Amino acid sequence: MFYGSITALVTPFDGGTLDEAAFRAFVRWQLAEGTQGLVPGGTTGEAPVLTAVERRRIIEICVAETAGKIPVIAGAGSNVTAKSCVMAQEAKILGADAVLVAAPYYNKPSQEGLYAHFAAIAEIGIPVILYNVPGRTVVDISVQTMSRLARLDMVVGVKDATADLGRIADQRARCGTGFIQLSGDDFTAPGFAAHGGQGCISVASNVAPRLCADMQNALRDGDFTRACQINDDLQPLTHALFADASPAPAKYALSLMGMMKPDLRLPLTDANVNARNAVVGALKSLGIRGG
């Protein structure tokens, strides 16, 4: 159910207000371009600066526009377990297919604390995809802890942003072949698939959804030559989108494409000049309008 190119959606703002019309159109475009899943309210969607009302609204819009055609995986990460449980419950009520839950940030829980945190969220009764991103959370969900969590019926997979491809085989051996493993980094997407991963939760697919979906389809078909050709084409874009704090470069790219305004909320600021230049060059190399 959860595989292929899954877009970690940006959240459009207009003068500080959620731009619902732009978001609705953006979701429709993603669907038309072949994206195989959507994540509203994740890190790329500036989740920490969304109000509870805004978060619920973007999930609601996403679910309505996809109409069951592709899965909606709602962001439900927090460093407060009770808050994540509430977010997961809301996502379930709104019709999301799963929740993406990052390891609690800043408070640096132990492995036992991590297990208890995710186990509590799993009790809500909506599929849980763990999000292991120690570069942001400062804590790593160990393979051993993940194997314990994988025994819970509602913990179905992981978004792995450790950039450690060697973990994939370890996690498969400990968690079972049915445990879904998704890359959390566009840079590792082809290698992740080669090691047995099922897809990527992508930033680049905000801007080039068709290419990202085509690459994932080629990987699933075992056509690594085609997949590597597409990945080579995507490299300038992937680098450009991380030339400044994400999602500033992605929003700048989408603004050039006429999709939305480049507005962000503090503490994030507009993409710097080097990132903007890189974005323009990347769009041009891919033949995308705005380049």
Image (cartoon, helix red, strand yellow):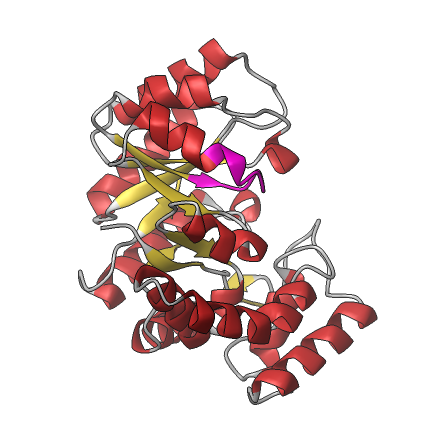
Does the rendering let one see residue 45? no
Q: Is residue 4 left or right of residue 107?
A: left
Residue plotted at (59% across, 62% down): 16
Q: Is residue 115 magenta?
A: no
Q: Is residue 166 magenta?
A: yes
Residue plotted at (23% across, 35% down): 126
Give percent across and percent down for residue 238. 61, 65
Q: Is residue 3 above or below residue 271?
A: above
The residue sitting at the left extreme is: 68
The residue sitting at the right extreme is: 273
Image mark count: 0
Give percent across and percent down for residue 199. 38, 53
Q: Is residue 14 above or below residue 141?
A: below
Residue plotted at (71% across, 49% down): 267
Give percent across and percent down for residue 169. 42, 34
Residue 48, quarter of the rendered image: top right
Q: Is residue 131 above or below residue 82?
A: below
Q: Is residue 258 above or below residue 82?
A: below
Residue plotted at (35% across, 23% down): 174
Q: Quadrant of the C terminus?
A: bottom right
Give percent across and percent down for residue 202. 48, 58
Q: Nearer the viewer, residue 242 or 252?
A: 242
Span highlighted in magenta in the image: 159-167
Q: Nearer the viewer, residue 143 or 201?
A: 143
Q: Nearer the viewer, residue 179 or 130?
A: 179
Does the rendering let one see residue 197? yes
